[in-house]
Image (cartoon, rainbow, N blue to C red):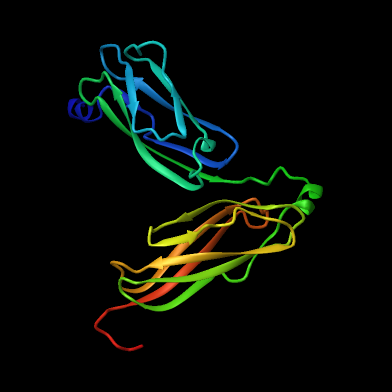
Amino acid sequence: SASQNKKAGHFRLKSHFILFGDVDKNQQKTASLIYTNNGTYDLQLINIERLPKTISWLRPKEPTKPGEWDTIHFKFDPSKTDESWGFQNGKFFLYTTDNFNPRKEIIYNAWVKKDFSHLRKKELKKAPKIIIDSKTVELGKLKAGLKKSGSFTLTNAGKTNLEIYYIKTDCSCTIVKKPKRTIPPKSSATFGVEFDSVFKKGKQSKPLTLYTNSPSMPVLKIMVKAEVIDYLTHDF
């Protein structure tokens, strides 16, 4: 119908989602979007905006004639930035010569980690092995506006260096102070964690996610817990 055309336009995408799925940090993955020209005039993709550093694309060479279809190819390369670990998602926009609806929104996602599925038994035996003293850092009570520190200890029980590639925090209120990036075999390292309670109230539980080269635990989640007490209460 005419009203449907107005809404979707003539540059019709088969899907508005690009799902790259699981991607190893050192590999690239491709995906594509297919569109058809539902109109009566040639259509062209002019540009794509708000793409993250990790995604590149190839422009279809010619304008797409009425009734024909074309493909936009995308490449996801998580090695382009240090931060691209874990769940990556967002949206970007296609700009087209579609009279009715020139701008199309595309949602993308990917899950980035180290993939060990190709390692042989012999290699797995030599691999680093992460052991953590506790998956919770309990900071107890603190007054609103103050900072409090705690720690967790990682041990490498494996035979080669344990690498901590990236530590992801969901909140700027929780930081890991000068984290050690490499832990040699048969040794341990203690990581200091600081929690800032400014603008926080009540029980707090903030995750830290570590991405490592330990096949037994490539993704390690640690919870930092605290209870923020108001200035006016005197129960401690």
> In x, y percent, where is residue 17?
40, 37
Residue at the extreme front: 178
Residue at the extreme bottom: 235
Disc count in the image? 0
Residue at the extreme left: 3
> In x, y percent, where is residue 227?
38, 76
Q: Quadrant of residue 133?
A: bottom right
Image point (45%, 60%), residue name: 175
Image height of 172 relative to 101, above or below: below
Nearer to us in this view, 90 or 44 = 90
Image height of 139 relative to 169, above or below: below
Image point (42%, 69%), residue name: 205
Image height of 226 relative to 163, above or below: below
Image height of 181 relative to 192, above or below: above
> In x, y percent, where is residue 89?
41, 43
Horizontal arrangement in the rendering, residue 13 relative to residue 166 (left or right): left
Horizontal arrangement in the rendering, residue 30 relative to residue 131 (left or right): left
Image point (60%, 67%), residue name: 153
Q: Quadrant of residue 61?
A: top left
Horizontal arrangement in the rendering, residue 160 relative to residue 172 (left or right): right
Location of the C terminus by quadrant is: bottom left
Residue at the extreme right: 122
Nearer to us in this view, 162 or 101 = 162
> In x, y percent, where is residue 209?
51, 57
Q: Quadrant of residue 228?
A: bottom left
Location of the N terminus by quadrant is: top left
